[in-house]
Amino acid sequence: MTDSKGKSDSFILFELAGASYGVRSQFVQQMEMVEQITPVPNSPAFVEGVVFSRGQVIPALNLRARFGFEKIPYDLRARLIVINAGGRVLGLIVDTAREFVTIPHDVIHPPHEAITGLSGDYLEGIAMLGERIVLILSLDGVMDSAAGVRPEIDAQPPAVSGRLESGARPGLKA
Amino acid sequence: MSMGESVTSTEFFAEFLDDYFAECEEHLIAARRALLSLEASVDQPQADRALLDELFRSFHSLKGISGMVGARAAERLAHELESYLRVMRQGEATLTPEGMDVLITSVRMLEDVVSAHRFQSALPDISPALERLAEISCQKTQPSGQIALAKVGAARALQNGLSAEEYARLEAARRNGLKVWRFEFSPSPELAERGVSVSAIRGRLQKVSELIHAAPLITSQGGVIFEFIIATHADEATFADWSDDGLSYDIYESPPSFPNSVNGSESMNQAPGSGLSRAPAQVVRVDLQRLDELMRLVGELVISRSHLETKLKRIEVSLPPAEWRSLQETNLTIERQLRDLREGIMQARMVPVGEIFERMQFVIRDLARESGKEVGLELSGRETEIDKYLVERMIAPLLHLVRNAVSHGLESPDERVAAGKGINCRISLRAFTAGEMVVLEIEDDGRGIDCEFVAARARKAGLLPAGVTLDEESLLNLICAPGFSTREEADRASGRGIGMAVAQRTILELGGSLALKTQVGLGTRFTIELPLTLAIADALIARVCGQTFAIPQSAVREVIEIEPAAISVLENSEIIQYRGGALPLLRLGRFFGLAGEGSQSLYAFVVGSGSNPLGIVVDRIIGQREIVVRAMTDPLVQVQGVAGATELGDGRAVLILDAAALARSLTTYRRAGGGQKKIEEGGRHSAVRGQTAMGRLKRSNAERRKQTGKT
């Protein structure tokens, strides 16, 4: 949603580990309380599990874990921000989310080169709202690198299974 | 055979009873439908004969089958209903409003009785109904009434030349889509010489049509001609050139003197897929379970084919291209055919939504009567088909919406007049498909929902912050909030404020959506969208380490209890004795890395194919449920051994196990040294709590070391 001059965008702001982040509201489908997340075994650690949202089963990502912060237990202020972008629907678990702001383009700067580490990949920019720093989230970043790690249970290199099947044991002649 | 007797084979009897209840439902549906149409005949000299016949047949059948299974109360009630209908068919009684009422109440009582039999609840007292039926059957009409009947009958004979019997056949033929023609044959000596006599003509007509009526007529000149009335599918071209043989013909319009069937604004025509007009011989009643089984088999075929595809890919390098290509072509053909098969079976589960609409008619009629409102019902799209499962789940929500509309939405006649509206309220039920969805609409032209009033109520209840205005979506969510009601006390029809919540929940659970459009003074429209395709399965529900899982019942060969002492360990795998062989076990808790102690008692689902069974070990088996399978499509949560998720009624996602994948995993799992399965990235969620990124890295390194050390 941009205003007529195309010079600002609207964002949902959320808090995570003491910092403020903004996510473009056009991608936010809804916001919910965090409750009843079903863990999915053998999924990446930052995937807290799945939840039902509007009849659909979606993954719920713990952003603290994603960004490498320490995880904390949920309280009543924690929120699940349901994102719908690039054909995927995901939930992001954050500490709190209350604000809805319009940020003009000219106060958003590209991320400083000095910001490295895990967080760096997920930022689209940094906005200065007066005294306040708001980190603008790159959904592509969050979702892209979260392209999923499939546990390779089935794929056994033929050589290995062959060896095991023949019952070869160390010390025995074949 | 009475219900109290013991039966040699309980299973056989149970199946028998199932058939009985299914047949009862069919006959009751037909009776309901006929009764609604019959209403138009109240106080007419002659009730629609075909409808009376239909009702008589329904009651006769109900009497018969109830007698067979020993459902005495149902049998008696059906018997009395049949008697009353017999009396009416014989023309010895006309249909009075009281008679109509008795019929409707008695049929409703019959439904309750059958229901009580089915669910083993207390039988209602049928004696009042029996008495009223007996009384009304004995009421003969005044002699004048009978004369009136005879007069009408005679007039008809003169006018149209059709007897009541013939007229009934005519209407039946019309309903089956046949066209009705009237032929006049003028015999002459020349025609007779050619062999074209009236019997020849009769024979000719009978060959291409159903002969409904044949009679001689005296012409004004004193000659004799013959009149034939036929019903046929044949094209006009068939008899176009028969005029040479002294035949003239015309389309035959039946006289308008009889009340026509009133079935909303819809005619019972042959819409494709319409269940209403198919001749009985072409319909087969199929157990839903059989269709589910077929679906499951198709599912397995799909899996097998994908294995085939994988293997084909592997041998691509070792085959001459032409041969490989031809193999691949066959593979693709099979894929296409499987898809068609799957769709075909889905189609077989579809029923016309008209079934639901009919139930609504009854309810609306009663409610309208009770509340003194004049309600007309408009139906459209009854032939729209939806999955049978959806029909069953949607009846309650739809009933609730309809009751709401009649009790709250529609105004009393006085109010309507005061508002400048016609006295007749209108409720419209519509069904149609839109892409991948089925859309159901319930619309009324009543007073609409007053947003401001609802908002005020909500603010008072603390559900709405001050200063926020309501849009239609928020209005709907408010109305559907459990416990929220704009009535001071619950009235019988609409309950205590949870009806809408349950309705909305059901719709969402089915993967659909509910929307609301309303305008004060004009009316309200609820729009329900439901997905056309559903994956539903019977599943067994189990608990493992405090977490709930579902497994499709079709994948489970047996459920066994395991004595922990009976488990032996053989080369990193646990096995038990099972049916003369060894059954390898997969402890689901361990395999999924779930925290929490296992329980003392163990149960296992035996899955897998004949030579490769596997026991999936769980802590407890909770029960069996029919579930709607929801895909987990996001790559982040596509995990080996999990086939999707479902919801058991509390909004919490429950994972569905993929038995085949688990069976495959077991082999690999064992080879990897058994024990706890991990991935590089970071292990268990519960274990990660309270750790920094560095801490996490250290931990998984340590575990990796442990694992390699184990081999």
Image (cartoon, rainbow, N blue to C red):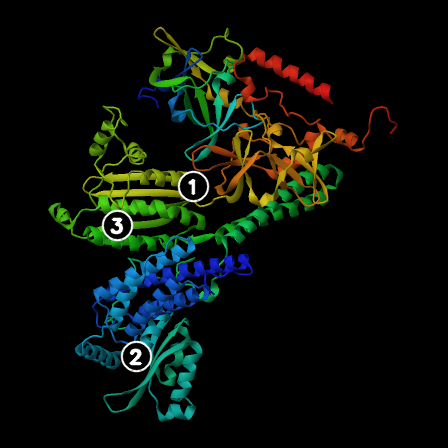
Mark found first going from the N terminus, 3 or 1: 3
Q: Which chain is mark 2 on?
A: B
* Percent of width and height locating residue B86: 32, 73
Instruction: Report whether B686 appears left or right of B503.
Output: right
CB atoms at circles 2 and 1 under 8 Å apart?
no
Instruction: Report whether B677 appears left or right of B644.
Output: right
Instruction: Report whether B75 appears left or right of B402.
Output: right
Residue B279 visible within the image: no
Res B572 quadrant in image = top right
Front position in the image: B327 or B102: B102
Callout 3 amino acid? Ile
Q: Residue at x 22, y 31 (%)?
A: B457
Q: Which residue is mark 1?
A: B510
Q: Which chain is mark 1 on?
A: B
Callout 1 amino acid? Leu
Q: Which residue is mark 3?
A: B427
Where disc 2 sits, the SS reads loop
CB atoms at circles 3 and 1 under 8 Å apart?
no
Q: Residue at x 61, y 46 (%)?
A: B301
Callout 2 amino acid? Ser
User: Residues at marks 2 and 1, common chain?
Assistant: yes
Image quarter where the C terminus of chain B lies is top right
* Disc 2 to disc 1, C-alpha distance: 52 Å
